[in-house]
Structure formats: structure tokens, C-alpha cells
Image: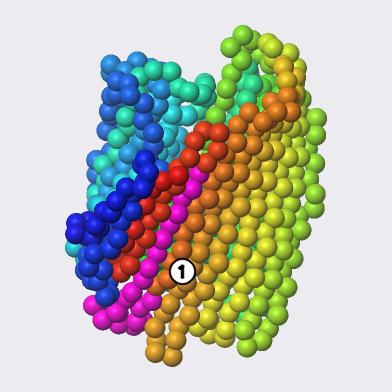
């Protein structure tokens, strides 16, 4: 927990802006380093009365879930301006990165992974705004949490966690969902039954490729006849689809999550994790065009699948929550799906063998769905158009002593609404980038150089005029190396990393940069 005597804070340059420089950066990684930190902003909290509830206080040694009970807070009402989840964790010794989830009443409110510890131990925390799940928190619920772990003579790290919810009295800035639903298991698969007056329906899917196999690194897989260790029938393209009664209702590009042991080099991630590693963002699908179908009071089959996963191969988890906003002035709504069209899925991987083997992939897909609802405020038509594209170049040598990828994914969505007032639209463009290479030199030393980017652009229009906009750029860079096949104390590991999280728009500005060297925090700068 190397958190003292690392930074010398310099002068302030403008309001809210500070610089810091390193003091006593070690020549190599030792047995301790700075606790994990991210450049992402903390959750903003209102200055109102608050109440706190503990969801879990437990240890994870194996794959036994923690099970407990949740009781709503007393003294803060049953409607809140904000609800904030906080997870505090500690671990020491030797341990892999581990994946975990937290369910309240069957609703997944957090998907997370853990940092790998130092021998002397580390502490970290995760904060998340979970106000959207307020409906779940208004009544007593079962709690289930699991961070699957293995503790033995080699992997000694026991994971301690303490998880709380803090409720802030008042009204939320935006209307929260009236209902938060999960899918029901039936003999025919999973089904969803929504209230008959649902006027907006959003599904969120916590899709992660994991399990330690090739699907954890799905973006590196190749098809025959390419000579690479991770194979997939159609190459590296992955697409997360959601279907309603067999009809494609949504498509999305998964984020290329990298956990804290990723790319064969945990020294990249000891202090600064990859974007989203501790707080996995769910994929969202606006299913409102299907509300006219779903509002008939019957259960409807809902399926989530990951296109591109080899048949019969596991490795993906995709739990689903469904958020519903209801019409307050009508008990039943009617409507219909009027359009559900998709282009053919394009997926081309070209293999070029040589001293440096190469696979060039270009893939993409487009879906448009539209439907109307007759509501208490008139007929409302919602149209969702989503376009996905993936371009990547994968290069490797025989024996994979050099293995690199340069890839870009785009997920471009527009949700347009007409009727009941001026036309409205929300355009969201997500761009994910990964540019990395791992090499093993003649001295049996492994080096990884990697850049990850998570960019989001959002523009909202009403009556053709822009009413809100935002831009986000979260970029990680790392360069680390160590000696293979050597005891930990003889690896002579070195590494630098940085993260810059920038967001700006009509709602304000945030800019935070972190940098590390050999486990010491060398820069912590904020400002706009």
C-alpha cells in the first residue's frame, strides 16, 4: 500500500488544478506499490440528508457466493435524489485477477474485477451511481455476491470486501425507472413480462468475455488456416445481440475489457487498471420500439447471444436487467412494431502468412427498428438505428514471441422519437481502440506496450435544436517488462503507465491525469 512519501504536491495553477512530481521512484517493482487508482471521476453526491445500508461484509476464498438480506434505509424516505454504491476491498499475497458480481433481488447492480495484490497487500475501492435501480431498493431483497477465487499454497490472496449503499434524500435530477425487472427462466428459455402501460423499455446487458480462455481475448482469435493458438470459426468479430420472440431487437459492440492480469503482463495494471476494469459498464438497448408487442400482458421470450463465439464454447456471461418507465395516466397501452430490418452481417478476415503472420479483419452490421405506442399523451413513434464496425490488424511471429493488435470498434446509435411534442433524438457514438504488442526477447524477457481508448460522443436534439451534448475520452497507456520463468524477486520488473480521463460538454468539464513508474504514483493532475 505504497501511498506515502510518493508525491510532492506542487503549486496550484488555477482553481481545482494541481500538479505532482515523483519522489523516490524505485528502480524496479518491489514487494509493495501504490494502491490501485483510476482517473475516472468520483460519483457526485448531493448535500442532503443521507442514510447508509451495508450490503455485504465478507471474504472470498473460493467459489461460494455470499448470501445476505437487504432492508431499505430508515429516515431517508423511499424516493432518493441519488443512491451510491461503494465497494472497499483488500487483498495481500499472491493472487490472480478475479471477476465478480453483486445482485440485489436478482438485479445485477455491479459487475467488477479485482486488482492483483502486492506481497504486502493493497486496498482499493469502487464507486457507482445506482440511482436507476431505486425501484429494487424500495423493498426487502435477497443479496448475492460472488468474486470467484482460489486460495491454496501458491495463491494465497483472500479477498476482503465491504459494500454499502448510501441514499440521499430528495428528488432525482432525472426520472428513474418505475420498474426494474429480470428475466424469468422457463422451459422455453428466458422470458420477460412487462407492465401493460410500459412506455419506455431499456435492457442492459453486462456482457463480459472471461474465464481465462480464448474468449477473454476474443479480439485476438483467428480462423483456420491461420497458425495461431486461439481459434474461432469466423475470426475476432463479436457482436452482442438481443432478440424478442426470435426477432433481432438490438445489436452492440462489446467493449474490449482487459483485466488486471491481461496481455501476459500484470505489471501494466498494478496501480492503474484498464478503463472499466473495476466497474464494467453494461450495454444498453432501447427496446421501446417493441413496447407495443411487450405490453400485451403475456410473457415474451428474450435471448442474448454473442455472435462469433465458436459453437459449444463457453466464456461469455450476459445477465440482463430491464428498466421500465410507465404511463402514469393509462393502465394499458397498445401499439405495434412497424419496422425491423438489418443489413447482412459483413465479416471478412484475410490471412497473410509470412515471417510475420497477419490477419486483417473488417466487419460490420446495421439494424433499424421502429414501433409506435398510443399513450395518454398521443401516439409516439420510436426509431432506433444502430451501426457497428470493426477494423483490426493482428500480427504475430511463429511461436508467438511477437504478438500485436491494432483495432478500432465503433458503435453508432440514434434513438429518434416523434409525436407528443417536438421531435427528439439522441445520437451516441462509441469508439473503442486497442493498440498493443507483446514481445519475448532473446534474453527471455517479456515486454508489453499497450494503448487502450474509450471514447463517447452524445448529442441530443429537440425540434432540430441541440439541447445537450457531451464528449468523453478515457485513454490508458502502459509499457512494462519482466524476466520470464524466474521467481518473483528475480523478475527485475519495470513498468510505466498513465491514464487521462477527459469529459466536457453542456454539463461541465472534468480532466484527470495519472502516471506511474515501478508502482509509484508519479503524477496526479486535475483541471479543465
Q: Which residue is drawn at 28% across and 24% down?
A: 51
In the picture as drawn, the residue positioned furthest to the top comes out as 329
The answer to which quarter of the image holds residue 228 is bottom right
Would you call the spot at circle 1 few (<14 residues within 10 Å), some (14-19), or many (20 or more)?
A: some
Where is residue 80 drawn, in percent x and y?
39, 21
Q: Which residue is drawn at 41% across and 54% down?
A: 513
Check the image and report above or below for 14 versus 358.
Answer: above
In the image, 6 versus 260, the foreground residue is: 6
Q: Is residue 270 visible?
A: no
Q: Residue at x 52, y 22 (%)?
A: 175
Q: Does the magenta stretch include residue 493?
A: yes
Q: Quadrant of the C terminus?
A: top left
Name the residue tied to disc 1: 263
Q: Can residue 74 be seen in this view?
A: yes
Check the image and report above or below for 129 versus 160.
Answer: above
Where is residue 442 drawn, in percent x and y?
43, 90
Check the image and report above or below for 117 versus 179.
Answer: below
Check the image and report above or below for 337 versus 227.
Answer: above
In the image, 18 versus 493, the foreground residue is: 18
The answer to which quarter of the image holds residue 46 is top left
Q: Which residue is drawn at 36% across and 71% down?
A: 495
**Total marks placed:** 1
Q: Give the range drawn in magenta.
A: 481-503
Where is residue 127 drawn, in percent x and y?
36, 41
Q: Quadrant of the N terminus?
A: bottom left
505 displayed left or right of 371: left
Q: Is residue 434 magenta?
A: no
Where is residue 58 drawn, in percent x and y?
24, 44
445 displayed left or right of 414: left
Tell me the SS state at disc 1.
helix
Amino acid at each position: 500500500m505504497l501511498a506515502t512519501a510518493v508525491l510532492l504536491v506542487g503549486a496550484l495553477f488555477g482553481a481545482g488544478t494541481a500538479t505532482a512530481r515523483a519522489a523516490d521512484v524505485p528502480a524496479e517493482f518491489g514487494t509493495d506499490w501504490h494502491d490501485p487508482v483510476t482517473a475516472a471521476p468520483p460519483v457526485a453526491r448531493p448535500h442532503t440528508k443521507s442514510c447508509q445500508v451495508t450490503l455485504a461484509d465478507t471474504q472470498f476464498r473460493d467459489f461460494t457466493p455470499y448470501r445476505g438480506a437487504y432492508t431499505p434505509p430508515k429516515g431517508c424516505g423511499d424516493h432518493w435524489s441519488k443512491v451510491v454504491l461503494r465497494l472497499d476491498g483488500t487483498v495481500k499475497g499472491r493472487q490472480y485477477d478475479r471477476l465478480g458480481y453483486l445482485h440485489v433481488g436478482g438485479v445485477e447492480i455491479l459487475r467488477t474485477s479485482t486488482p492483483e495484490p502486492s506481497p504486502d497487500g493493497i486496498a482499493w475501492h469502487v464507486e457507482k451511481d445506482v440511482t436507476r435501480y431505486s425501484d429494487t431498493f424500495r423493498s426487502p431483497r435477497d443479496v448475492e455476491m460472488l468474486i470467484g477465487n482460489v486460495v491454496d499454497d501458491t495463491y494465497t490472496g483472500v479477498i476482503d470486501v465491504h459494500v454499502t449503499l448510501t441514499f440521499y434524500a430528495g428528488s432525482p435530477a432525472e426520472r428513474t425507472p418505475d420498474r426494474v425487472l429480470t428475466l424469468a427462466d422457463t422451459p422455453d428459455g428466458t422470458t420477460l413480462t412487462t407492465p401493460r402501460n410500459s412506455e419506455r423499455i431499456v435492457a442492459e446487458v453486462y456482457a463480459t468475455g472471461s474465464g481465462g480462455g480464448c474468449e477473454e481475448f476474443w479480439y485476438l482469435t483467428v480462423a483456420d488456416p491461420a497458425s495461431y493458438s486461439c481459434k474461432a470459426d469466423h475470426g475476432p468479430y463479436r457482436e452482442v445481440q438481443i432478440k424478442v420472440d426470435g426477432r433481432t431487437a438490438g445489436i452492440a459492440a462489446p467493449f474490449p475489457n482487459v483485466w488486471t492480469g491481461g496481455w501476459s503482463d500484470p505489471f501494466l495494471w498494478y496501480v492503474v487498471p484498464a478503463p472499466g476494469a473495476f466497474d464494467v459498464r453494461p450495454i444498453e438497448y432501447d427496446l421501446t420500439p417493441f413496447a407495443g408487442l411487450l405490453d400485451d400482458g403475456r410473457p415474451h421470450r428474450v435471448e442474448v447471444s454473442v455472435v462469433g463465439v465458436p459453437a459449444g464454447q463457453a466464456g461469455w456471461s450476459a445477465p440482463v436487467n430491464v428498466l421500465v418507465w410507465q404511463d402514469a395516466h393509462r393502465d394499458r397501452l397498445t401499439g405495434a412494431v412497424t419496422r425491423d430490418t438489418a443489413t447482412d452481417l459483413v465479416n471478412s478476415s484475410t490471412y497473410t502468412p509470412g515471417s510475420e503472420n497477419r490477419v486483417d479483419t473488417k466487419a460490420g452490421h446495421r439494424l433499424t427498428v421502429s414501433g409506435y405506442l398510443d399513450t395518454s399523451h398521443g401516439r409516439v413513434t420510436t426509431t432506433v438505428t444502430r451501426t457497428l464496425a470493426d477494423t483490426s490488424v493482428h500480427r504475430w511471429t511463429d511461436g508467438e514471441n511477437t504478438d500485436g493488435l491494432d483495432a478500432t470498434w465503433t458503435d453508432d446509435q440514434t434513438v429518434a422519437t416523434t409525436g407528443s411534442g417536438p421531435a427528439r433524438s439522441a445520437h451516441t457514438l462509441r469508439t473503442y481502440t486497442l493498440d498493443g504488442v507483446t514481445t519475448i526477447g532473446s534474453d527471455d524477457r517479456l515486454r508489453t506496450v499497450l494503448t487502450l481508448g474509450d471514447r463517447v460522443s452524445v448529442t441530443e436534439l429537440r425540434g432540430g435544436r441541440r439541447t445537450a451534448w457531451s464528449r468523453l475520452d478515457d485513454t490508458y497507456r502502459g509499457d512494462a517488462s519482466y524476466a520470464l520463468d524466474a521467481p518473483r524477486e528475480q523478475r527485475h520488473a519495470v513498468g510505466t503507465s498513465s491514464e487521462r480521463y477527459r469529459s466536457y460538454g453542456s454539463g461541465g468539464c472534468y480532466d484527470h491525469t495519472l502516471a506511474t513508474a515501478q508502482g509509484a504514483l508519479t503524477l496526479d493532475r486535475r483541471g479543465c
